[in-house]
Amino acid sequence: MPKLTPLSEAISAHVHDGDTVYAAGFTHLIPFAAGHEIIRQGKRDLTLARATPDLIYDQMIAAGCARKLVFSYMGNPGVGSLRIARSELEAGRLEWEEYSHFGMISRLQAGAAGLPFMPMKQTAATDLERANPQIRRITDPYGGPDLITVPALNPDVAVVHVQRADSEGNAHLWGIIGEQKEVAFAAKRVILTAEEIVPEATIRSDPNRTLIPGVVVTAVCHVPHASHPSYAQGYYDRDNEFYLRWDAISKSAEMTRAWLDEWVYGLKDRDHYWQKLGPEIHERLKVAPRPSAPVDYGQY
Amino acid sequence: MPKLTPLSEAISAHVHDGDTVYAAGFTHLIPFAAGHEIIRQGKRDLTLARATPDLIYDQMIAAGCARKLVFSYMGNPGVGSLRIARSELEAGRLEWEEYSHFGMISRLQAGAAGLPFMPMKQTAATDLERANPQIRRITDPYGGPDLITVPALNPDVAVVHVQRADSEGNAHLWGIIGEQKEVAFAAKRVILTAEEIVPEATIRSDPNRTLIPGVVVTAVCHVPHASHPSYAQGYYDRDNEFYLRWDAISKSAEMTRAWLDEWVYGLKDRDHYWQKLGPEIHERLKVAPRPSAPVDYGQY
Amino acid sequence: MDATFTYSSAELMIINAARLLCDGDVVFVGVGQPNLACNLAKRTHAPNLVMIYEAGVIGAEPARLPLSIGDPTLVSGSLSVVSMYDIFALYLQRGNVDVGFMGGAQIDRYGNLNATIIGGDYTQPKVRLPGSGGSQEIAAWANRCYIMTPHQKRRFPEKVDFLTSAGFLDGEGGRQRAGLRGSGPVTVLTDIGLLEPDERGELVLTALHPGKTVGMARENTGWDLKVASQLRTTEPVTEKELRILRQELDPTGIYLGSE
Amino acid sequence: MDATFTYSSAELMIINAARLLCDGDVVFVGVGQPNLACNLAKRTHAPNLVMIYEAGVIGAEPARLPLSIGDPTLVSGSLSVVSMYDIFALYLQRGNVDVGFMGGAQIDRYGNLNATIIGGDYTQPKVRLPGSGGSQEIAAWANRCYIMTPHQKRRFPEKVDFLTSAGFLDGEGGRQRAGLRGSGPVTVLTDIGLLEPDERGELVLTALHPGKTVGMARENTGWDLKVASQLRTTEPVTEKELRILRQELDPTGIYLGSE
């Protein structure tokens, strides 16, 4: 299978029932298109890990893809509660494992670095440590206070959306870069979606911008607008209105089901989704350019 | 004292006899100008830490600034031995502490992250572990094999050269970025030298490029060509001929002394040094431009 | 603008929060009210405030009111953007953050916060809250913390149901014994006044906003709230502060009207 | 070019090293001979070789012969540049490196390397060498390692004076017991032939270059060198390989003439 492949084939080949999946992106570049394709393909029993489950996991949980949630902040960012994840969890229908943000990202840092765990200084917030037996302690061999540890997270699959990549998966990303690099190195398989597939020469013109190298990427998919209602810095804006609308939709199981039917099951792919959003929303999410000052690498 | 200050004042104010100094840069952006200023000001009893001592520490050791060397590879890169450091060490006139590259950089990573140490997987190269009591072991609380640890390195002063910074020390650097970010966060004080002082707007046009933020910088100095005979990617080339010449110079104490007299003690500052190098060397080190493809941050 | 200076509880808290910030402070900001407080401080007495967002943005200068912690307006024109690991490790854990702003469903007598569960036990909670996010680390490692919250009895219990982030723990010396950094929640800012820790780490009433009373504070607190011997009154809200807030920072009133 | 195919020892080793590389391999390259071997492989049978340099450069395509590990020509036009922590942690320790090239002053019977001291003890060495640099981790964590060195008795002692980086340690199962990754130094390439580990981890002579003899190998080895039952002869150096090396890769002969 060539690396550059349609998203549906990448999801079909690389996401298996029962997998631990990490859809990357701290509020930015959230891979909604891949999440929707996972829903369409009816994947089941997934362990969904993400610092902030955000709407993408709320939707996947609503669609019945998830067995377990691993998270550090379960809210609808800027809006309030993440209703479906929360109610499933309160009802005992969804397993969960919880860390602080730093705990979650330290797990990925350990996974990326090939370490079994990462140490963190104590925070004295010991209730979570008691609640989660995966949070442990080690002695400082240099005589200081004990440290907290969290185990490496090495997801079966990471799904990462980027602004631009070449066909081998060498990827430039900018703006908020949350945990994309870390999860790409931590995961066993990496599905990359990109706003643009660019010539290798574009990537090579600025190697310091390449946070994810092709050597860790399993599949590359060209999926413009993959992050709506999240955003891609420089490409389109965050659709805050949809984040507010989801708060209303997710209050009702019927409305949620209807939304999934209309916007996920009823559509073939992200291009259809984007067309269906329509010109008014396209216009509202448009962004005027603000280019970076170039740097000179020099011809050596 | 304003942050933007002449290098001589920054060295005078922030480098004290007995300090642990880390001059950053893995072969790239080595802060030679600051090293020479430390020599000129006759600083003494320094602990000099660097993964690769390179010529900068060979010269500082020759000038009598050092009490101790902390390193992971003591060679003249691409040439051979680092004669002065090596002979002082063999003669027992210079204390030393030795790690692998990964050990050294893990020490800085720990120092930068506010951790007392960093774990590393075992390499079975146990002779160095036996030779250096600072290399220790911890148990994996998740049941895996023991890990090796190295203690955090938090130098008193980091000296870092960058391509461009604003007057508050927010710095863009690109090309080989070795350990500059890590040491800037690990150190108690940071002296930044820069090829160019640019408007804040240049920095703000590409925030993902800012590896060192002004909040950790103590002093900013405008010092063009500060890295010769090392190089600044996109600004001037590495002077390999000087690296070869130093191999010859450093064979003889007299020649070394004469070189220091002529090129360090006899000069006021880096501008004089660069002028003294002369137009032929300027021409040889010139680099044709090779700009990065810009990215778009968008006006939000 | 109305010369009688009517203002909402939110405006009152934001303006008083802004005044707590010092010029040059490095502040770990949340969106919403803390963001408004920081921007107000920056436009009045603290032009060199450095705003850090947990999404990894340093020195943000948002051109519009950010609506989420990861709003792209925080990125464009900022000084630096770093990974989440770096923002927590190199900034917070390393001790490069002066001020953290905190919130939570419950704040107890010793300034401890709960953002995890209410009622039941952890595995079968009555109400599941969002969880720590960054607050566990902000509370532990910022040099000082400010908590902004409406003054309501249910928000101020004697003891939190779940210790999400540390205030003064069980009182005197608790933070020191636990090896935490910084001085903890030095001010709790409500719509009634200010609570500050006494030498034992217990939150006591140290100031009232103009027109508010000790009784109002005590009635809305879940423990026997002590009153400082030197009870202050906060400076009245000024026309300038209100103007900047309403006209420049939140012209559509997204955060100013609400609690 | 001379039709008699005269070539230096360095050329012989570089060409044979190039042949060991597979298309698509991710190779941790040093400057000098390993760099030439990789570039030769890339221009012959392994166009998709990914070259990584310990200075943090991934996918370098040097336009000129790099003269140091941090030569700027490695950076311009490369695929990615990362910090030193990341190159060691995310690439090596994580197991993303297929091949490591190693050198050292001493290689012993079990493929262990010494680049630290010769003679005396660690605190008072007779000769102080540069030290590990990256070799400790490359040896431990790359999937397989190649060692290139002239075949000289002083370089091949029975046991290294200092264990800078692990080969097969004390023999059979040594790497596994120590929890190391990968298969270790699978080939030692000299100007006489190839040494490869037997099932006990002892380096034995498995191939000779054309014109070389078992006697030459045994004379220049510091232990009683065993000879594999199936002793091979390496393929003769080809005109094409020499032409690429001399005309394209090192036209001024900086690395090709030397040992």
Image: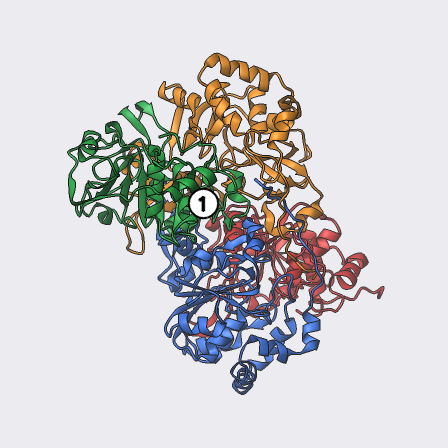
Chain colours: A blue, B orange, C red, D green
Task: For label 1, count other residues whose C-alpha is less than 10 Å away and answer few (under 14), some (14-19) or many (20+).
Answer: many
Q: Where's residue A25, x and y in %?
A: 53, 63
- Report whether D34 appears left or right of B199: left
Q: Where's residue B228, x and y in %?
A: 57, 29
Instruction: Return the residue found at the far top.
Output: B254
Classify A5 as above or below A129: below
The chain containing the residue under callout 1 comes to D
Q: Where's residue A201, x and y in %?
A: 56, 54
Q: Where's residue A183, x and y in %?
A: 45, 59
Classify A95 as above or below D158: below
Quarter occupied by residue B158 = top right
- Secondary element under disc 1, as helix, strand or loop, is helix
The residue located at (44%, 41%) in the rendering is: B105
Instruction: Return the residue found at the far front.
Output: D3
The residue located at (29%, 50%) in the rendering is: D182
Q: On the rendered image, what quadrant is the C terminus of chain D found in?
A: top left
**Front-most of residues B182 and C38:** B182
Q: Which residue is mark 1?
A: D85
**Front-most of residues B14 and D89:** D89
Q: Identity of the amino acid at label 1?
A: Tyr
- Report whether C193 appears left or right of B40: right
| Camera sees residue B102 | no
Q: On the rendered image, what quadrant is the N terminus of chain D found in?
A: top left
| Camera sees residue D163 | yes
Classify C4 as above or below A144: below
